């Protein structure tokens, strides 16, 4: 199945000094990403990559993702537009050659098959990781909540002090 944001790049295009590539999502791709990410809207996605070959078939990718999405505020439940900006580093490795290392400090690995990597899918994955899981609209404050409700069984005892 082809991903919503598909930008294949042949490994042959990455020279000895690396390659700089920018991928931008079309309006239709943004709409499909919004469905995938369970968002009201993805307004724009742009990702710039600097690709460096590591041996014959591995690629180190340093990237900057910039996006604009519509999210739902967890406090007010109102939709609001939010910028997303993420600097990241991942490594493309042939499928089946992923590391078993569980080191949280090591680069994420993205498996690929054949002689091409998918920069659009890599950008989509980074967008999913960069989204705030508890988005709050700017200026929204948490409502004041009493520590204990007045009808608590021990509320009368507190008033005796």
Image: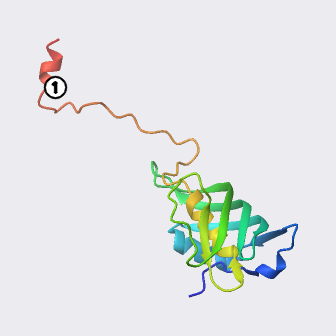
Q: From the top left corner, tell me how far across and down residue 93 is, in percent.
A: 64, 73
Is residue 74 left or right of 60 when viewed as pictured? Answer: left
Q: Name the residue under label 1.
A: 155
Q: Quadrant of the N terminus?
A: bottom right
Is 61 in front, or is 55? 55
- In the image, is 39 to the left or to the right of 21? left
Residue at 53% from the left image edge and 74% from the top image edge? 35
- Residue 19, image x, y percentages: 84, 69
Residue at 17% x, 19% y is: 158
Q: Which of 136 and 109 is in front in this view?
A: 109
Label 1 neighbourhood size at 10 Å, few (<14), some (14-19), many (20+)?
A: few
Work out whether residue 113 or residue 127 is closer to the camera in this orientation and state it.
Answer: 113
Q: Residue pushed farthest top?
A: 161
Q: Is residue 137 above or below residue 125?
A: above
Coloring basis for residues: rainbow
Where is residue 80, by image quadrant?
Answer: bottom right
Looking at the image, residue 150 lies above or below residue 19: above
């Amino acid at each position: 199945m082809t991903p919503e944001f598909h930008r294949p790049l042949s490994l042959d295009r990455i020279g000895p000094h690396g390659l700089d590539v920018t991928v931008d999502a079309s309006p239709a791709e943004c709409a499909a990403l919004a469905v995938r990410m369970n968002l009201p809207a993805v307004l724009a996605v742009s990702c710039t990559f600097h690709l460096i070959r590591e041996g014959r078939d591995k690629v180190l990718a340093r990237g900057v993702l910039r996006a604009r999405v519509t999210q739902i505020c967890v406090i007010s439940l109102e939709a609001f537009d939010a910028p997303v900006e993420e600097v990241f580093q991942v490594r493309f490795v042939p499928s089946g050659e992923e590391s078993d290392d569980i080191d949280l400090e090591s680069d994420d690995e993205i498996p690929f098959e054949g002689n091409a990597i998918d920069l659009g899918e890599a950008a989509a994955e980074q967008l999913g990781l960069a989204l705030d899981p508890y988005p709050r609209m700017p200026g929204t404050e948490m409502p004041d909540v009493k520590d204990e409700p007045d009808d608590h069984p021990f509320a009368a005892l507190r008033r005796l002090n």
